[in-house]
Image: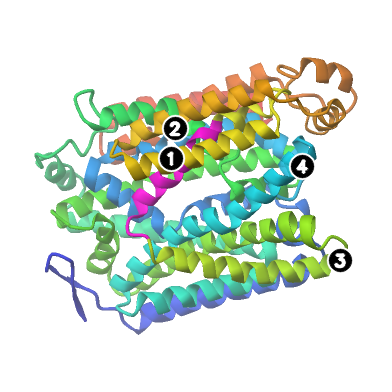
Amino acid sequence: MDGTDPRGIGYNSAMIFLDYAIIAFFLLVTVALGFYFTKRSSGSMKDFFVSGRNLTWWLAGTSMVAASFSSDTPLAVTEFVVEHGIAGNWYWWSFAIQGMMVTFLYSKLWRRAEILTDVEFFEFRYSGKSAAFLRMFKAFFGAVLANSIIMGWVILAMATILKITLGIDPVVSVVICIVLALAYSMAGGLWGVAATDFLQFIVAMVGSIALTVFAVGKVGGLGALKEAVAARPELDYLAFVPSPGEALFTTFLVFIFMQWWCASAADSGGGILVQRMLASKSPKESFRAMLWFNTAHYALRTWPWVLCGLCVVVLYPGLASPKDGYPMLLMEVLPAGWKGLMVASLLGAFMSTVDSSLSYASSYLTHDIYRRFLVKSRSERHYVWVSRWAMVVAAVLAGLTSLMMTSVAKAWMFWTLLGAGAGLVKLIRWYWWRINAWSEIAAMGNSLVFSFLLNTFTKLPYWEKLVLNIVVSTAVWVTVTLLTRPVETEKLVQFYRKVRPSAFGWGPIAALAGTDGEAPISLRREALYWGVSVVFIYALTFGLGKCILMEWATGAVMLVMAAASGWYLYRNALR
């Protein structure tokens, strides 16, 4: 049948039997693949949540990419492009700096810790009641509030897509998809999640590239697309970086100089990524998984979404809700068969995030609350059973949260602001022995309260709220650190011997720990590799973008820079 967009413009929404058959087949294969790993994941909590620590780098890294790409991502990118042009994507492009920092400075440390969840880190690194409280609170906060917000905006995006593409009640459609993801996640644990993520990533990439090809063709080709957006007077849509005279420029500076290191998960990228690092076969596999994740996340996935956003600018000018433009584009430009594949790819992207979110939320509820504080001496199979039902609780809470959300992009920014004041302490806790549990409690508590006050009682722009939260929260946690006792020496020595961070910042503890075992990482060397990797990821991402937009000379120069920096990393960091 024919549909109508929010401005009354008709678009072709016809889907035929072939489209529905493709969607059904994809869902069937996904669920079957997840159930295939039921036996392998049922033996223990380690099997269920970190795959027995046996994931290869390519499977762990691809699972990270799939989990971070959901149905909300292309909708949010479309919002950024429509409202700010290509340069609007610096909100998430800036996190490439953080992603590469985690790759070189933290990924091996996480894997060496051999813990089951990232919140278990608190009692691994600190001691006493303050560490126990921090673990319990962060587990509850992460599983109930954080996971509900993250899954909420993912569900909101999928509801928008299904309403426009399938023309059926989005609530019913989303419930069906959540139940399917819940079923194979409960059965297959992280093995099932990682295997289905791999399939879903391939289908999602094929779908997004196909939509881009057809959308650009609808506009008349890349040349016509560039001419059309360049002719629009409101802003320079094709600029990769905002000019100093634009309102976005100040926000851009905050993005690249502050936002990436102040994020609440600055040393990891989030619980889902930590789970994959912990599940990798070795510290080296964890490192390679993160390197592949960041390369695919930024360089490979950016441009199909950005080009579709530019097509939305041309085809649907004045669209009241920019996030609707992506699914509208899907229904208008794709022929039969391709529509079904594209909807299947978005369903796959949605389910790959849902299954990962359910897995790590369940690990918090079961391992860090139920097993640690409530029921301590039951069998491994009992805790696996509890973990499966904890996924159901997480799914219900997320569904309820999604009903209160309206904008994906705004939800992203709200979440970044909420934890911005705690980012710096997360980075330093690995490299300075003096950090204690009270440092993190002060940083987290102040950041939550102060960001709430800023959102409730001020109308400041996003970047000003971010800066204020960072400055005030940092002053608070540094003061608290200096006024409270350090962690017991014995605990610090145990941590240092196990993780082997750089001796820099651990002088007295490193001397007590001795030199036996694995060598500490070289902070100077890894920081150099991190700097080179930032050049690599941006040169590759923007070099591909310039070539796609037919700016051949600039694109070629950037790709040469990417090749040179990539070769340096291969020779020195990967071999």
Compare marks 4 and 3 and give the one earlier in the sequence: 4
Residue 329's tag is none
Tell me the crowding category of disc 4: few under 14, some 14 to 19, or many 20 or more residues within 10 angstroms, Cα based. Answer: few
Which of labels 3 and 1 is toward the front? 1
What amino acid is at disc 4? Lys
Disc nearest the viewer among 2 and 4: 4
The disc, 2 or 1, on the residue closer to the chain's N-terminal end is: 1
Q: Is tag 1's residue or tag 4's residue first in the polypeptide sequence?
A: 4
Q: CA distance from mark 2 to mark 3?
A: 43 Å
Residue 8's spot in the image, x, y percent? Answer: 11, 69
Q: Are marks 4 and 3 in contact (CB under 8 Å)?
A: no
Q: Circles 2 and 1: CB distance less than 8 Å?
A: yes
How far separated are the C-alphas under marks 2 and 1? 6 Å
Can you give x and y, in whole percent of width and height, for residue 86 in the image? 28, 40
Quadrant for residue 391, please give it: bottom right
| Camera sees residue 539 | no
Kind of residue indicated by mark 1? Ser
Secondary element at tag 4: helix
What span is colored magenta in the figure? Answer: 405-423
- The residue under label 2 is which amino acid type? Asn
Helix, strand or loop for disc 1: helix
Query: Which residue occupies 22% across, 37% down?
Result: 238
Tag 2 residue: 469
